[in-house]
Amino acid sequence: MAKNPAPTTAPRKVARDAGLPVRGETAELVLSKKLPKSTGAVIIAIFAGEDDTIELAGSTTLDSIFSDKQQAQILRQLEAVGATAKRNEITRVPGIEGVTSVIAVGLGKAEELDDETLRRATGSAARSLRGVEVAATTIGDLGLAAAVTGFGLGSYSFKGLRRETGEPESPAPSIHFLGGDKSEFVTAQVITESVIFARDLVNTPSSHLYPESYAVIAANEAAKHNLDVEILDEKQLEAAGYGGILAVGNGSSRKPRLLRLTWKGKKSAKSVALVGKGITFDTGGISLKPGANMDNMISDMGGSAAMIASIIAAARLNLRINVTATIPMAENMPSGDAFRPGDVITHYGGITSEILNTDAEGRLILADAIVRACEDNPDYLIDAATLTGAQLVALGIRTAGVMGTAEFRDRVALTGREVGEQAWAMPLPEELDEEITSPVADLRNVTNSRFAGMSAAGRYLQEFVADGVEWAHVDIAGPAYNTAGAYGYTPKRATGAPVRTFVELLSELAD
Ligand code: BES
Ligand code: MN
Ligand code: ZN
């Protein structure tokens, strides 16, 4: 007799050793000395030359696989099918000697090549590998870390809880990088896996990822990599006075949590506090959101996923820096136990907020977490949150807004652009000071104005950051979740942004 299928809603009891119900699939990345025997496709790079000509990106690795004559033949075939070598163009031609096909990846003009071009083009190549089981590539010669990142992230696909159809599914390929520095390869691989962990967390639906299960899943993954973990449940939150997390989380029967992860890299090193918004689903609460596209709000824990993945990466890379992650987790639901507009809540540490809109919930849980994070006297504090629709209005779907103390804010935004996670510095203008005041509490959680909604949220959070801490607030409402089409190495749904920005920053701040 066929076994009953699992219930459509995950069981509410969370096993102590719980992990993610499903992971996305990605290509296996291998550093190889020579061409594997069973290579189905060799992936090479082509550049656009003068007068609409194309040229193969030559290298010693390419020479070790194909003779000059064979390279000339590949070039002729590519010209014959009209390859132009424009960026992200993928052209497949018949292979030579046991290799089924040659896949040429366009990189544009050689003199304009940069890492992001390489990442996007290799990402596009990875997405075109259907049917190939074993691929080998020479593109690592142009930038091994960028190629590993592009192929690794571009090959990601998340099939969620879809049943096996019985139709033969092409397994994710293995991609062999022919030569290169082992430690550069491994570092790029760890960072890629961290981005993918963040994507998996964000892609997991709220039926399966809710505060209690999220905290356990993240804690288990962190413990595997030697981080210290602590989870506060709703009773402990109550006892300690976490009024923001409790107000938001209490409307749901799935009660809130506060997760704390600690990585001790070195005694005397700099310390960085990471804080991330972990709203496992945002209905808006009593200030209910409209129904259209509300399902996208499974991604409202994107900031927390990025921070959890980043601190785990710091541990895996053994960075000589001290990092804590303070992650408030709550589900924002309307119910008889939900908080209301007009309520006044008392945050961890004592600051009070008048609630004028229960849909401005992210800043309320972040406020508690920021105060807790500052108790450890960090040198730097970074928070990431899918915080405002206003971020999308101001900067579009791909560019994060970065606010905070001037120097560090600019540094975080610049680092984002350097790793290909678009980010832009935004101000906290002084006229917002009076807009966040309330007659009945220290602060109000929304302003009366239609203007500068992203900055208003940042300005509110600023009230909770301790003096002297270098602070950056990163609003990733758009960048965390791609509701448009896949491009380069960025798939639909969860993007894993801005994990690479934060890992790069932690690496640079480490000694
Ligand atoms: N999670 C949303 C912000 C959001 C919107 C993220 C769209 C991703 C895509 C946040 O909690 C929210 O609802 N913000 C409100 C704030 C407003 C009530 C001041 C918003 O932006 O509308
Ligand atoms: Mn909201
Ligand atoms: Zn939200």
Image (cartoon, rainbow, N blue to C red):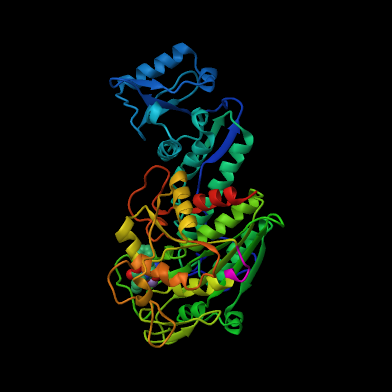
Q: Residue at x 54, y 59 (%)?
A: 307
> How far across and down, in percent of the image, does residue 339 sit?
42, 84
Name the residue nearer the viewer: 116 or 413.
413
Q: Is residue 14 left or right of residue 356?
A: right
Q: Is residue 490 left or right of residue 67?
A: left
> How far across and down, in percent of the image, does residue 5 sit?
50, 64
> How far across and down, in percent of the image, does residue 31 sit?
59, 33
Q: Is residue 312 visible?
A: yes
Q: Residue at x 56, y 38 (%)?
A: 29
Name the residue nearer the viewer: 276 or 374.
374
Q: Is residue 260 above or below residue 320?
A: below
Q: Is residue 446 visible?
A: no
Q: Residue at x 43, y 49 (%)?
A: 421
Look at the image and say whether residue 253 sits in the magenta stretch.
no
Name of the residue lying farthest toward the right: 267
User: How many marks on residues?
Assistant: 0
Secondary structure mostly seen in magenta is: loop
- The span picked out in magenta is 373-378
Name the residue nearer the viewer: 42 or 234.
234
Name the residue nearer the viewer: 300 or 94.
300
Q: Residue at x 42, y 38 (%)?
A: 130
> How far across and down, in percent of the image, does residue 225 sit?
66, 55
Look at the image and say whether residue 375 sits in the magenta stretch.
yes
> Which quadrant does ligand 2 occupy?
bottom left
Q: Is residue 351 left or right of residue 48?
A: right
Q: Is residue 274 above or below residue 63?
A: below
Q: Is residue 185 above or below residue 22?
A: above
Question: Could you say which quadrant of the image residue 45 lies in?
Answer: top left
